[in-house]
Every structure is written in structure tokens, then in C-alpha cells.
Image (cartoon, helix red, strand yellow):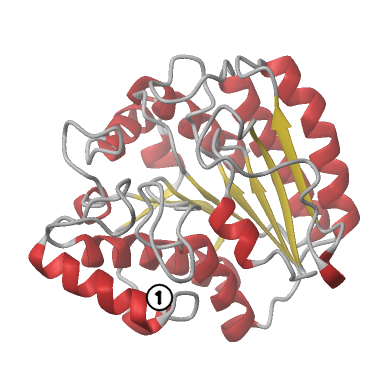
Amino acid sequence: MNKLTIYYGKELASYGFGEDHPFGPDRLDAFWTEACAQGLDTSADIAAPVSAGRHDLELFHEHSYIEKLVNLSRFGSGYLDSGDTPAFPGIYEAACVVSGCVLDGLARIMSGQSERAFIPIAGLHHARRDGAAGFCAVNDIGILVETMRKQYGIRRIAYVDIDAHHGDGVFYAYEEDPQLLFADIHEDGRQLYPGTGLAEETGKGDATGTKLNIPLTPPACTDEDFMQAWTRVEAFVRAAEPEFIILQAGADSLAGDPITHMQYTTAAHTHAARRLSDLADELCDGRLLATGGGGYNRANLAAAWTAVCTEMLA
């Protein structure tokens, strides 16, 4: 069994909104250059991108929205939402690659081919079932969760999000689902998009108490703030006894990101990946899948994502 599979290839880089956009196609190679410098290209199994099918996307998304995505992708103009997520020619196909890599990572883990997986261009956590949001044309996390349940019978899933932005697309899709355990450390929504993720948002109905939102204030929070919050996340995940753990390892929480205010170093991502790897070994036969998420300073995302991969390999 391989310890870690990392996905890399030009098709995965195609999910990007142009060289002048924070979410540009160069993000993948920024990561890959550093990954190779650290020897991850030889210590991990490197997998080529694969594509999901429309039926996979519609496990989570409404048919009418995917129809809109397909049509706007064909023309490559307009917005998929109210103005944050522009369409470009081939955005549907690019979104299928993101989702396909995530689902292939799941398949490798469930078949025993790999213990863990990392998909750098993935973790599009803002998209809703009925639409795009915040640079996210689809929600590959939601597609992953639905596939786990329908194809593999996995019910109890822990989702941990350390991106600077609240993972609202995941949270609200599963707000009433008691078996999706959600833990999110993020910049306070009063200062940052999408403006959600209050500490009081703990789930609804039978799911009350299965969601943990930790908004950090002031905006310029540090590794020390993260470590204090992390103790709550770790206790929450352990108590949940999940069958599978997902990490959204957004690097926009590091100091110097152009669109957020947080001040982490790579110590935060190193610690999160190390502890979740240990918890996965303890609770769910090592099953851990991580996505790169956000991060718009190229040096930061390269450092944070390689740190995550290094810990997943340990």
C-alpha cells in the first residue's frame, strides 16, 4: 500500500481564472516546484488527473445548476454566481477534473491502494447544491461525501477546514445531517467573505452539536490562536469516532495572503496534518483525504501544502 497519493497534471491546473486572478492556473505548479524540491515526487505516489462524470456532480448538485454550468462553460462568458465566479471556456470540464481527482483519491483509499490522498487544486468549499460561489464552480467536498455514502456505505465522516474562509457550502448543505461532523477554524466572518460561521452555528435539529465553528478574532490571528482552537477541534473529532476524515487545508490563512488578514505560519498546517494523520490511524484505519483549498500567495501555498503532504507521509 502507498502511504500517500498526490495528484498532479496540467488538466488539474486548468481549474483557474486567468493569470491575473488570485485563483490562477499557476497555483498548481507553484506547489509542484516546491514538492519536487522536497522530494515528494519520489516519496509519494504521483497520480495523473482523472475526470468525474456529470452523474457524479449531480450526486450533490441540482441538475438545473449543472445544466447552467455546462452551458456557460461552452460559451465561456458571464458569471456562475452574482459576480465572484466567472465562467471561462471549459470550466465544466475543469471542475470535472477537480472532482474526479478527489473521487479517485477516495477509490484508492477504499481499495487499499493508498492510505491517504492529497489533491492540491480541490476543496472548493463555497459552492452550493444549486449554484457556484466564491471561485467555486462545484463543491467537490459535497460530491465526495455523497459518493462515500452511496458507493461505499460510509456514514460518519469528519470534515475539518482550516482555510481562512468559512466552508459555508459544506456547512449549510449538511447543517441538519448529524453524521457529517464539521469543524472549521476561520477568520471571523464580520471581516471576511462569506460572512458566516458564527460560533453559535452548531447544526440544526438532530444535528445540533455536530458542527463546530471557531471564528478567530482579531483578524490578524497567529499560530498561538490556531493552536488554542485546535485543541477543541481534535477533541471534537476524537469524540465523533468517524469512519473517514477530510481536511480542507486552505493556505490563505498564512501571513501575507493578498485577500485575507490571518497571520499563521506553516506550523499551523503542519500541526493539523500531523494530528489528523494520527487520529485517522487511531479511529478509521488511516483514511484521510486532504485538499489544498484556498491560498493566493504562491510561496505560502507551496510551503503549507508541502508541509501537509510531508506529515501525511510520516
Residue nearest the observer in this picture, 295 or 137: 137
Q: Quadrant of residue 30?
A: top left
Count of number-bearing discs: 1
Q: Position of residue 9 (x, y in %)?
A: 25, 51
The answer to whether 240 is drawn above or below residue 42 in the figure is below
The answer to whether 255 is drawn above or below residue 200 in the figure is above
Q: Mark 1 belongs to which amino acid?
A: Leu
**Is 266 on the left-hand or right-hand side of 296?**
right
Q: Position of residue 166 (x, y in %)?
A: 59, 43
Q: Quadrant of the N terminus?
A: bottom right
Q: Residue at x 63, y 21 (%)?
A: 267
| Residue 113 appears in the picture as rendered | no
Q: Residue at x 45, y 45 (%)?
A: 44
The answer to whether 189 is drawn above or below residue 61 in the figure is above
**Is 299 on the left-hand or right-hand side of 276?**
left
Q: Quadrant of residue 99?
A: bottom left
| Residue 301 appears in the picture as rendered | yes
Q: Residue at x 74, y 43 (%)?
A: 213
Q: Residue at x 26, y 69 (%)?
A: 69
Local packing at callout 1 (Cα closer than 10 Å; few below 14, some 14-19, many 20+) is many
Q: Quadrant of the C terminus?
A: top right
Q: Position of residue 136 (x, y in %)?
A: 38, 53
- Which residue position holds label 1? 57
Q: Residue furthest left?
A: 75
**Which element carries disc 1, helix, strand or loop?**
helix
